[in-house]
Amino acid sequence: MSAPKPSTSVGKLNTGASIPLVGLGTYLSEDETGYKAVLHAIKVGYRHIDCAALYKNEDFVGRAIRDSGVPREELFVTTKVWNTQHREPAKALEESLSRLGLDYVDLFLMHWPQALRTERITDGNMITVPKREDEKPDVDTEWNYIKTWHLMQDLPASGKTKAVGVSNFSVKQLEKLLADPGSKVVPACNQVEVHPLLPQIPLYDFCKKKNIMLAAYSPLGSQKAPLLDDPVILEIAAKHKADPAQIIIGWDVKRGYVALPKSVTPSRIESNLQIVNLTDSELEKINEIHKKGEKRVVDPEWFDFEED
């Protein structure tokens, strides 16, 4: 059996650009701890860093990139527009670049297919979830994600992002977006929760058919999912003398899409990049895990995954 090796796997976006298939997720990575995590990740070989306006970490991500000594063109940087800025994604991109201290990002995503109203924001903080008087999210019912996409699809022409894509989109939402006459660009990527307990098979198949790169956040199922103790994962890990996480990330890469494991622990950051080349039979065994019961980890109270 093959031992874990540093991942150098890359995929291709529909723009023709290369994208490293293992990147560093930075959700909940904050302040100096997060800065050191990104810096260490780049030092040990990561070339793909994922962040977002919502994570409130673009400043330290950008500082780590600048301090790494690695030429900017050798890194792939993703960030995302938050729900309160759906009506002005160009401005949101400018603000993200200012926080990052970069001239451009490689991929700019619509974080969620849901626009939020801003009238109730009184402190100027746009990166929030405004609530109505009944404490429900203040959804912008006069706007929708298709209108947002119409504005986003022009952003690569500015040179401030190389590509645009979406996140947390379902098959139905992608179908609606692609069918709209005003949609001239196919999203380069759809970043969603994917792991063996939520393999997203219909979405995986759809994105593959439409040449939309899938990217997996929470690829290890987070701390709330028992994936790292799953008997199938443990059995395969033992055969390869690997960590369970390395098997799961290897499963993502074997399926041909991006995995974005998050960690601030130096040893874990390093081991997450050392993945296993799984056999086809091992892939199929892992593909069966979800049949014991699918489990979604990221399920915010302000978003309905069943909506179109």
Image (tube, rainbow, N blue to C red):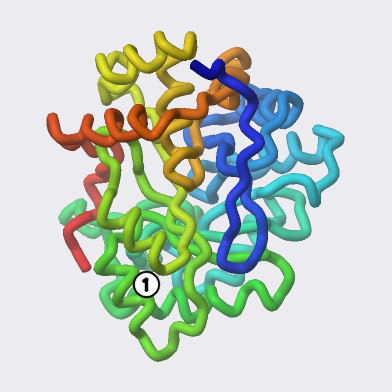
Between residues 268 and 258, which one lies in front from this camera angle?
258
Q: Position of residue 264 (x, y in %)?
A: 56, 22
Image position of 170 (left or right of 44): left
Residue type, mark 1 in image: Tyr
Residue found at the very far bottom of the displayed protein: 181
Q: Position of residue 95 (x, y in %)?
A: 64, 59
Of helix, strand and loop, which one carries label 1? helix
Residue in view at x 65 percent, y 65 percent: 16
Between residues 216 and 237, which one lies in front from this camera angle?
237
Report the residue marked by disc 1.
145
Residue in view at x 54 percent, y 69 percent: 89
Image position of 253 (left or right of 138): right
Whether residue 41 can be seen here: yes
Q: Position of residue 190 (x, y in %)?
A: 43, 57
Q: Quadrant of residue 153?
A: bottom right
Q: Position of residue 289 (x, y in %)?
A: 22, 30
Between residues 15 and 283, which one lies in front from this camera angle?
283
Placement of 239 over or under 197, stated as above or below: above
Residue in view at x 67 percent, y 39 percent: 61
